[in-house]
Image: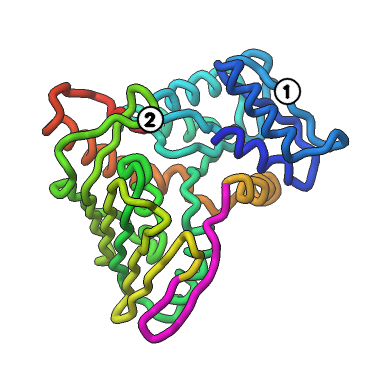
Amino acid sequence: MGSRYLQGLSKVQFPLDIFVSDVSAESLAQAEARWNEVVSSNTSHKVDYVVGLLGLPDNIDIAIIATLADVREKIVMQLSNQVKVRYWILEKLLAQNVDDLLSIKDVISQNGMAWVNTPMHIWSLYRNIRSHYDDKPGSVDATFDKVNRLACNAIHYIDYISRWNKALPVSVDTSNLFHQWEPTKREGFYDVYGELIIDFSDGSKLKIIGNNDDPNKRVNIIKVNKEELHVSESQGIATALDGITITGRCEFQSELTAPLVESILQIQSCDLPTFTESVIQHRMLLESLLKHWNTYMPNKLERLPIT
């Protein structure tokens, strides 16, 4: 993900001094290779690749933290102690438990402004779907099926429905999740299948169904009042029973980064949710999933091992 952010930065319209930091020399080499895929030798941007946090400047305009969730709090703490950061973009999930979440919150409140990268509402397909209902207010009943890595990706859907009517999640129901958590491809990390149900303060309801089915065959359903949209992300189209058709895309991170960074640097804002908004969503989700793990899994944990 970090290298995709880096590729996106190549499209920023004014010169940047970019520092790419990782503890892995192999990851830095991959990032450099991906940068070279998208830029020419006469680029106005300057890129330095550094191992760890050594060699960073004393002041950073934007810090993009694209690590896994298990070390995000540690990296935010270390970076904020070493340099002054004006703005932060943080990948989800923000943390693996509420204590780390609140620790990051304390740092952010004292050191810059922050946004969280849950950009589903920015994707043109889902942005156009929401615009279709601008003059048709009502709560939402949404089902997102065939979701890969449900626990890891649920926050995207929670944020999208939360932003629909500016409503807060009020409950997370884990009773229809499978009891057994499954190892992911990343060693030491897990995820879970089944159904996750979230209720919102405006009466909206969200159901997220995680399974091993082909996500390209996914058809999501969004209902507002009596109208029902069937959404195919792979085809970039949403259709209603009355024949209404809405089109769009789910843009790549490499396409989204430059507009977000330009907006932050020029007007001190962007279309991503603020850290404060996202903390509310993350806290309820993390508390519910960690309780589910400790109810059914043999080893009781203080941190949920998800990415």
Q: How is the image coloured?
A: rainbow
Which quarter of the figure has residue 157?
bottom left
Amino acid type, label 1:
Asp
Q: Which residue is rendered at x = 32% and y = 50% of the image? A: 213
Q: Nearer the viewer, residue 260 or 110?
A: 260
Based on the picture, tell me whether residue 251 belongs to the magenta stretch: yes
Q: Main secondary structure of the magenta part?
A: loop
Q: Nearer the viewer, residue 42 or 140?
A: 42
- Judge whether residue 155 can be spotted in this image: yes
Q: At which x and y percent is residue 160?
A: 41, 57
Q: Which residue is rendered at x = 61% and y = 16% of the image? A: 25
User: Mark 1: few, some, or many residues within 10 Å (few <14, many ≥20)?
Assistant: few
> What distance separates the C-alpha of mark 2 from that of mark 1?
30 Å
Q: At which x and y percent is residue 302?
A: 24, 24
Amino acid type, label 2:
Lys
Q: Which residue is rendered at x = 14% and y = 38% of the image? A: 179
Dot 2: element: loop
In the rendered image, which residue does mark 2 sit on?
185
Q: Dots 2 and 1: beta carbons under 8 Å?
A: no
Is 152 situated above or below 161? Answer: above
Badge 2 or badge 1: first in the primary sequence: 1
Report the span colored magenta.
238-252
Q: At which x and y percent is residue 100?
A: 35, 27
Q: Nearer the viewer, residue 231 or 11?
A: 231
Is 301 situated above or below 128? Answer: above
Is 219 situated above or below 197? Answer: below
Q: Which mark is residue 15?
A: none
Based on the picture, tell me whether residue 180 belongs to the magenta stretch: no
Q: Which residue is rendered at x = 60% and y = 38% of the image? A: 4
- Judge whether residue 102 can be spotted in this image: no
In the rendered image, which residue does mark 1 sit on?
48
Which quarter of the figure has residue 46?
top right
